[in-house]
Amino acid sequence: MARSPLTAEFADQLAPDMKSRGFRKAGSTWHRDQDRIIQVMNIQKSQWSDRFYINVGVYLKDLGTEARPTEYRCHVRCRAEQLVSPAELPELHLLLNFTEPVPPVERYAMLRAFVAKSVLAWLDANSTKEALADTLRTTGTKGFFIMKGVPECLAITTQ
């Protein structure tokens, strides 16, 4: 399915920040290959409106052989909302709803800040299989989609 012009614009706005952090772009998905994991971030437009979602995933090389997995094939994944504080959720939802009257320059600047502060910070902190396991043990797995085999691979329990 072809990307909408709005999706392409959003992806282009995020691309320089993602590239500077070592991610490679394919459409509206970015991949960063780390030693034993592949980190993925994807922007997804709702099929019913101009609302977007930011999807985050970690693919464990111990559990698969894909070189550029889609976000939904990642072994551990969540939406960006999981990575921000409850107080920040209303603002993030406003910015991701492109029908809301926010000037584009302001919207994209604030979205880049959210991505850096929440998504990229979380991915940076979880750049190894061991760090990811520690995070999931400490913060729990609530709000994350955890595929079969992950608890055994990371030696974690799921909630």
Image (cartoon, rainbow, N blue to C red):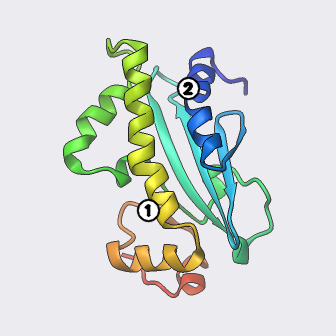
User: Which of the 4 image quarters holds residue 62?
Assistant: bottom right
Determine which residue is flagged by label 2: 13
In the rendered image, residue 10, in percent from the top left (x then y), is placed at 55, 25
Residue for point 57% across, 86% down: 152
Please say if 141 is above or below 97: below
Residue located beneath label 1 in the image? 144
Is 143 above or below relative to 29?
Answer: below
What residue is drawn where x is 41% and y is 32%? 111
Front-most of residues 88 and 155: 88
Decide which of 36, 81 is in the foreground and name it: 36
The residue shown at (67%, 55%) is 32
Q: Looking at this view, name the residue that lies furthest to the left.
A: 87
Q: At 52% from the left edge and 51% from the top edge, which residue is drawn?
A: 56
Image position, residue 157 (x, y; %): 43, 83
Which picture quadrant has residue 122? bottom left
Give the spatial CA distance, label 2 vs label 1.
26 Å
Residue 96 visible in the shown view: no
Residue type at mark 2 is: Gln
